[in-house]
């Protein structure tokens, strides 16, 4: 039991700090709200798929602090983001830019919708343009059988 | 010994699956009845063999047989029994065994209850199902054998990933697999129909229940996963657009599209080749999901078993099945002659729009999920695609779906009249707008999201109810109510599922727009305000668990001097797995959850405490449950029990209910 407790202690010491810590929070609520919004769009570089806002990793905490420093220094949202992207690369942007090859990503949906819509429209036109098909005529055998049934 | 027998049964199952995938197919081609009839006993044998194999593995987990490598890696003697059992599928090998078991079970269901299917169609469906079985059994045996022994067994195991030791997550994977694998039925039917060169209303009636079942299971599985993420991950989020979540979401979207297009095939004999394509794609995306989760090419929070060799194998299976099916589709789709004719304003057109939106939205999710991979391979850019992108790119589709849904669902088949439709819906529209305006004036934040979400949701929910009311016909109230109770179950199912969709849309918008968050240091004994509440930190103490150590806080929630609840959030350390987890303290109620998380002890004294008020959050899962319920109601509709195209009533099909 004591050993388990010791182990837990060691692990606790090694356990990374939680997400946004109380000591990081800026006194100005408006600035803090901006910092929170921005940090939700920045990826923690060592985590699997977490923003620095959610992450428990040390580097995420560092980034949160850097971001707040920039905002306190009077940077605009864009400047603060650019500051971090310049150091960590566009990998940290959870919202990919719409520049260069990324245009493909952003336009894929609208393009697909457009193409799909066109195909659907053509299909609908063909379905309705055909008008009601000529009522199916009965084959001679069917007609005879029908007459037989009706007579009965 | 039991373990060896289980292993042997699995090898036998592979042999049986091989026979099942070849003999009936030849039989169906040559019209040899005896060869075709091989399929049914083969399917039954297969499910028995794999079932035995699964039982053997479960036995090894329950008895903590540490001579088995898989048990060592994923179990521990101290673990509670329920997690010893769920540990069977809490890992790559075991979950794959569950996958093939469910696959075989679906196949066997066709063999047992498919008495009223044309024999050649039944033989072909079972053969295709057998082929999928061969591929995955080979994958299991050659790359991920769960029955490998260790020469020197250790004294104890390494424990299951603590995040997976949770009731919500114990049952999340089986439901997802029931869904994923259920779509294999739609695939098998589609391929069999392509080989037969024939799709008709009877075929659609056979495919729809399987798709419905798969979709219901996927809905429940995804909801369970999201609910688990909400209470376990500790920051009150419910959906993260993680690649693994997307992997389950894409098949769900395709299954939803398939459900709707199959109605058109069934009622109007149109959209045949599109429905076939959807069935192929839906299963294809299940396979892609499997690939994403198990190959590790796309990093994610909970990808397990990252192994490139396995990834290649799944990619091969994917290529083989999709390549084969799509080639067959290209060759034969033109044979699917459409009969139904309809005007641009009609139920058919509305369902085409539904399919377009669902399929394109799934495509957007797909592109976003694989884009980091593509960008790195093709453009040499290392980038991320996260929630902001998905929220922006996906939300418009949900909005468009919600706007169209009530109109489409009241439109008549063949030819509709928008002015006639407008009559019952005008009131619904006015009421929804009024509700939105009310929300706008009541809310404290000036965000447009909440009110818009409410308008859309009310439009969908009230629209579904108005549709149901219309179906009751004209006449005095009592008569209409009486007619309402006699409506087919599928009408009720439709209404329930659409109401569920509206409810979920509302809850997601509401919780996103109106969530309150608070982060602070609190000393023991101190109180702090949280929205209309006051919270007091009474105590923090260490509490031992069966296989973990917990630091537990005691927080009292008060309102107007009255104690409402005592919450005990925990931080846990699992010493064997060397992993910390958080257990949030949540006061659930219908209109809001109060969600408290205990953080670290601060150097200057006191504890970090995170608090959230999550308005209407439980409606997210209530909506999902309603959708699943709607699917279930539709599934129990009389026309599926009295299967169409049957020359005689099939007693087996009735007994299955």
Image (spheres, rainbow, N blue to C red):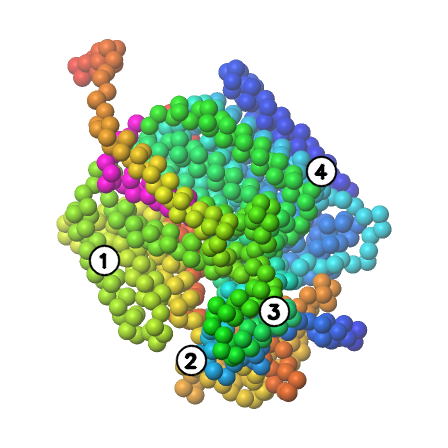
The C terminus of chain B sits in image quarter: top left
Closer to the chain start, of discs 4 and 2, is 4
Disc 4 with disc 2 on a shared chain: yes
Q: Main secondary structure of the magenta part?
A: helix
Q: Secondary structure at mark 3?
A: helix
Residue that carries the numbered disc 2 in the rendered image: B531
- The residue sitting at 62% across, 36% down in the picture is B316
Residue that carries the numbered disc 3 in the rendered image: A60
Residue that carries the numbered disc 4 in the rendered image: B142
Q: Are marks 1 and 4 in contact (CB under 8 Å)?
A: no
Residue that carries the numbered disc 1 in the rendered image: B428
Provide residue B582's location: percent of width, then percent of height. Answer: 60, 69
The numbered mark at residue B413 is none
Provide residue A55's location: percent of width, then percent of height. Answer: 59, 67
Q: CA distance from mark 4 to mark 2?
A: 57 Å
Q: Are marks 3 and 2 in contact (CB under 8 Å)?
A: no
Disc 1 with disc 4 on a shared chain: yes
Disc 3 with disc 1 on a shared chain: no
> In the image, B268: left or right of A76?
left
Magenta highlight on residue B351: yes
Question: What chain does mark 3 sit on?
Answer: A
Provide residue B510's location: percent of width, then percent of height. Answer: 38, 66
Q: Nearer the viewer, residue B636 or B345?
A: B345
Q: How many C-alpha atoms fall within 10 Å of the one at disc 2: few (<14), some, or many (≥20)?
A: few
> In the image, A38: left or right of A130?
right
Question: Residue pushed farthest left?
Answer: B475
Question: Residue pushed farthest right?
Answer: B152
């Amino acid at each position: 039991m004591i050993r388990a407790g010791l182990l837990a202690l060691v692990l606790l010491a090694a356990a990374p700090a939680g997400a946004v810590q109380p000591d990081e929070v800026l006194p100005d609520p408006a600035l803090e709200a901006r910092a929170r919004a921005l940090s939700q769009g920045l990826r923690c570089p060592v985590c699997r798929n977490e923003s620095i806002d959610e992450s428990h990793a040390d580097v995420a905490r560092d980034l949160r602090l850097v971001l707040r420093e920039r905002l306190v220094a009077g940077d605009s949202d864009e400047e603060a983001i650019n500051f971090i992207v310049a150091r960590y690369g566009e990998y940290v942007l959870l919202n990919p830019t719409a520049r260069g090859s990324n245009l493909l990503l952003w336009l894929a949906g609208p393009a697909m919708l457009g193409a799909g819509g066109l195909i659907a429209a053509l299909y609908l036109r063909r379905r309705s343009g055909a008008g009601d098909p000529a009522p199916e005529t009965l084959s001679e055998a069917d007609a005879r059988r029908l007459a037989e049934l009706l007579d009965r | 010994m039991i373990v060896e027998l289980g292993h042997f049964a699995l090898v036998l199952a592979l042999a049986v699956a091989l026979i099942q995938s070849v003999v009936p197919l030849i039989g169906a081609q040559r019209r040899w009845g005896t060869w075709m009839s091989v399929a049914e006993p083969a399917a039954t044998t297969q499910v028995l063999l794999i079932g035995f194999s699964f039982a053997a593995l479960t036995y090894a987990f329950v008895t903590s047989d540490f001579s088995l490598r898989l048990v060592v890696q994923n179990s521990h003697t101290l673990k509670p029994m329920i997690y010893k059992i769920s540990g069977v599928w809490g890992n790559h090998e075991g979950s794959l065994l569950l996958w093939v078991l469910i696959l075989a079970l679906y196949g066997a269901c066709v063999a047992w209850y498919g008495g009223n299917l044309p024999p050649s169609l039944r033989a072909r469906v079972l053969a295709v199902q057998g082929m999928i079985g061969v591929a995955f059994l080979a994958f299991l045996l050659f790359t991920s054998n769960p029955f490998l022994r260790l020469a020197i067994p250790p004294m104890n195991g390494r424990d299951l990933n603590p995040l997976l030791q949770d009731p919500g997550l114990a049952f999340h994977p089986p439901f997802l697999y029931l869904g994923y694998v259920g779509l294999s039925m739609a695939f098998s039917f589609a391929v069999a129909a392509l080989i037969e060169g024939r799709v008709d209303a009877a075929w659609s009636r056979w495919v729809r229940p399987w798709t419905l079942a798969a979709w219901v299971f996927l809905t429940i599985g995804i909801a369970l996963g999201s609910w688990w993420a909400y209470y376990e991950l500790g920051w009150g989020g419910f959906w993260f657009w993680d690649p693994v979540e997307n992997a389950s979401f894409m098949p769900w979207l395709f299954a939803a599209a398939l459900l709707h297009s199959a109605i058109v095939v069934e009622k109007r004999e149109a959209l045949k080749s599109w429905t076939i394509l959807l069935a192929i794609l839906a299963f294809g995306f299940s396979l892609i999901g499997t690939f994403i989760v198990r190959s590790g090419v796309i990093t994610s929070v909970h990808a397990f078993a990252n192994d490139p060799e396995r990834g290649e194998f799944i990619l091969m299976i994917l290529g083989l099945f999709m390549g084969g099916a799509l080639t067959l589709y290209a060759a034969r789709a033109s044979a699917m002659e459409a009969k139904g004719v309809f005007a641009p304003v009609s139920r058919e057109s509305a369902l085409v729009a539904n399919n377009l939106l669902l399929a394109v939205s799934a495509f957007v999710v797909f592109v976003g999920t694989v884009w980091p991979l593509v960008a790195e391979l093709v453009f040499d850019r290392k980038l991320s695609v996260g929630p902001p992108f998905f929220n922006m790119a996906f939300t418009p589709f949900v909005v468009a779906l919600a706007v169209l849904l009530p109109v489409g669902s009241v439109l008549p088949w063949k030819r509709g009249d928008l002015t006639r439709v407008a009559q019952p819906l005008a009131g619904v529209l006015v009421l929804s707008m009024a509700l939105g305006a009310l929300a706008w004036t009541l809310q404290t934040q000036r965000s447009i999201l909440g009110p818009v979400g409410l308008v859309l949701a009310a439009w969908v929910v009230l629209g579904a109810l108005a549709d149901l009311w219309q179906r009751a016909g004209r006449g005095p109230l009592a008569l209409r109510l009486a007619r309402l109770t006699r409506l087919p179950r599928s009408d009720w199912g439709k209404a329930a599922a659409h109401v569920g969709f509206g409810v979920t849309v509302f809850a997601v918008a509401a919780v996103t727009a109106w969530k309150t968050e608070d982060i602070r240091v609190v000393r023991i004994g101190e109180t702090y305000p949280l929205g209309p509440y006051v919270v007091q930190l009474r105590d923090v103490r260490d509490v031992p668990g069966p296989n973990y150590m917990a630091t537990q806080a005691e927080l009292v929630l008060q309102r107007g001097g009255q104690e409402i609840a005592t919450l005990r959030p925990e931080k846990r350390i699992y010493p064997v797995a060397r992993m910390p987890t958080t257990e949030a303290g949540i006061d659930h109620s219908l209109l809001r959850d109060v969600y408290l998380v205990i953080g670290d002890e601060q150097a200057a004294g006191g504890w970090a405490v995170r608090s959230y008020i999550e308005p209407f959050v439980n409606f997210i899962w209530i909506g999902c449950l309603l959708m699943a319920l709607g699917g279930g109601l539709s599934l129990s509709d009389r026309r599926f029990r009295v299967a169409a195209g049957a020359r005689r009533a099939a007693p087996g099909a009735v007994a299955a209910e």
